[in-house]
Amino acid sequence: MAGGYRGRFAPSPTGPLHFGSLIAAVGSFLDARAHGGEWLVRMEDVDRPRAVAGAADGILRTLEALGLEWDGPVMRQSRRDDAYRAALADLEAQGAVYPCACSRKEIADSSIAGPGGLIYPGTCRRGLPPGRGGRAVRLRVEGGVSFDDRLQGEIHQDLEREVGDFVLRRADGLFAYQLAVVVDDGDQRITHVVRGGDLLDSTPRQIYLQRLLGLAVPSYLHLPVAVNERGEKLSKQTLAPAVDAARPVPLLCQVLRFLDMPPPPEVEEGRVEDFWRWAVARWRPGSLPALRTRRAP
């Protein structure tokens, strides 16, 4: 593809691959291959305490069994602290970050809820309280961010009013997801991001960071999030079962039906190579369901 399309799938190895994550994998893979582009895999294990031993390798084995072939080496966030430290130093030089002494309880007691969680009230924005040391590092935000999602349409978020200054380095010393994903997408030269709609509210924060760091802003497409019968997102916390890759084509066809791309019987009964050939040729993002959530099959 002219311009060099580079997409990615970035699961968190907190457990085996489940149906919700598989939707993002399939959607991002199809978009990359339909554009004649590259598809990378990145393990988002920056939150080390949540990573489960062996989960990353298990996810990779499942992708291989389903015929999802990635390009290049697998990036692992847990090995990239130097890159995140350099980005944070850049932001410090700009005066864009500040230390925060607030505990979670203090924030909960003095905040209101926004679309992405509690809105930080700016307690430490003008300096640390007397006798208190900085625990976390926050980004100072001003105004809002708008972007055009390829599926969900025009999105606007007033960061100052709806999110507040957000954490880039946590109180435990670990770097936050928002910083890590922005640095990784920049270093991997990602041009297109296709992922679940649960991350739609995080995208304005990431674009804000990309602009501060002088990084290119990818094109975004947020797919519907698979939810269970109680309306909960499929995840380890909601006990989503691991996908069974023993019969790859029927499983992949389930994903396409979820995305309103039902394959004909001959595809469902055929080989995995034939499935991907059919699916790539018929990938039309404009025909996908423009929903934030959808019941899993």
Image (tube, rainbow, N blue to C red):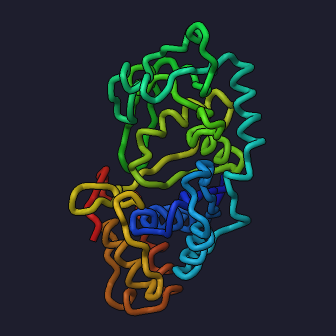
Q: Is residue 10 left or right of residue 95?
A: left
Query: Does residue 198 sit above or below 240 in this rendering?
Result: above
Count of residue discs:
0
Query: Does residue 172 sit above or below 111 in this rendering?
Result: below
Mark yes or no: residue 114 visible: yes
The spot of residue 182 in percent (x, y) is: 62, 41
Q: Is residue 251 left or right of residue 66?
A: left
Q: Quadrant of residue 172?
A: top right
The spot of residue 151 in percent (x, y) is: 38, 50
At horizontal 54% and vertical 57% (from top left) the residue drawn is 12
Q: Quadrant of residue 159?
A: top left
From the viewer's side, name the closer residue of 8 and 57.
57
From the viewer's side, name the closer residue of 202 and 175.
175
At horizontal 37% and vertical 87% (from top left) the residue drawn is 268
Query: Does residue 126 sit above or below 204 in this rendering?
Result: above
**Which quadrant does the N terminus fall into?**
bottom right
Q: Is residue 202 left or right of residue 230?
A: right
Farthest-out residue, left: 229
The spot of residue 19 in percent (x, y) is: 40, 68
Mark yes or no: residue 9 visible: no
Query: Does residue 215 sit above or below 197 in this rendering?
Result: above
Q: Is residue 102 left or right of residue 153?
A: right
From the viewer's side, name the closer residue of 14 and 66.
14
At horizontal 43% and vertical 68% (from top left) the residue drawn is 18
The spot of residue 284 in percent (x, y) is: 41, 63
**Which quadrant does the C terminus fall into?**
bottom left
At horizontal 59% and vertical 77% (from top left) the residue drawn is 61
